[in-house]
Amino acid sequence: MRLYDYPVAPNCRRVRIFLAEKGVSVPSQMIDLSMQEQLSSAYRAINPRCTVPALQLDDGTLITEVLAIWRYFEETDPEPPLLGRDAKDKALVTMWERRMELDGFLPGMDAVRNFLRSLKSRALTGPRDYEQIPELIERGKMRLADFFQDLDGHLSHSPFVAGAEFTAADITGFVALDFVAGRLKLPIPDDQIHLRRWSERVAARPSFQL
Ligand SMILES: N[C@@H](CCC(=O)N[C@@H](CS)C(=O)NCC(=O)O)C(=O)O
């Protein structure tokens, strides 16, 4: 088994945190995005979608998409459960994790990928090039401000994103927040005390040092 990984890529971080929470270690190989190694013919032959993370099983099966990689390890190593315990719980974790991705992670990606000069014709991931659209930077930032505010309100009555326990929804929410804070200089506003309390609590977990 091998995990194709890149240390500073936020989607790879989501997988590394998940594995660390479960205490699972997987041999990894770095695909250097700064050198566009994801577009090399060698990596295209492994993953034609040209993205990381990607998990190759011993029988050669390739699993891409963070959620699918998580699902694999949730089944092979169920404890501690990070995608929910029972039917209701699993549905709620999926719902909140999707909201973290759709409302926070993707607007953050939109803003960053349409902003960084180094990604000039790489505004979207994948094998094809797309030019940046500068207007998407502002829209992404506006959506992120709404995301911060909505999440702050939600966390005023919930210790973690999907309820009483730490789950994968916290991983996606925090990685989105941390990524945009660093790349776009968008820190948590001072008055969003619930968001700050949650973010400090989650960031202190050993898995988040990865
Ligand atoms: N939806 C995919 C997204 C994967 C993705 O966008 N990965 C980024 C790194 S965070 C990537 O491969 N970037 C390659 C590029 O910029 O060309 C997933 O869940 O794994």
Image (cartoon, rainbow, N blue to C red):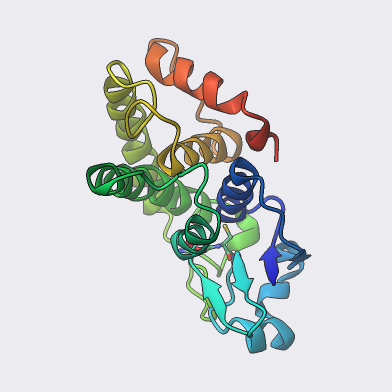
User: Is residue 192 among what the camera can see?
Assistant: no
Q: Is residue 145 above or below residue 36?
A: above
Residue at 45% from the left image edge and 11% from the top image edge: 190
Mark count: 0
Coordinates of residue 125 in the picture (x, y in percent)? 52, 69
Residue at 22% from the left image edge and 44% from the top image edge: 88
- Viewport quadrant of the N terminus: bottom right
User: Is residue 201 among what the camera can see?
Assistant: yes
Ligand 1 rendered quadrant:
bottom right
Coordinates of residue 191 in the picture (x, y in percent)? 38, 10
Coordinates of residue 103 in the picture (x, y in percent)? 32, 44
Residue at 48% from the left image edge and 55% from the top image edge: 74
Coordinates of residue 38 in the picture (x, y in percent)? 67, 74
Q: Is residue 79 above or below residue 40?
A: above
Residue at 72% from the left image edge and 54% from the top image edge: 25
Residue 189 quadrant: top left
Left or right: 89 in relation to 11: left
Q: Nearer the viewer, residue 57 or 201?
A: 57
Q: Is residue 122 above or below residue 66?
A: below
Q: Nearer the viewer, residue 19 or 16?
A: 19
Left or right: 164 in relation to 91: right
- Viewport quadrant of the C terminus: top right
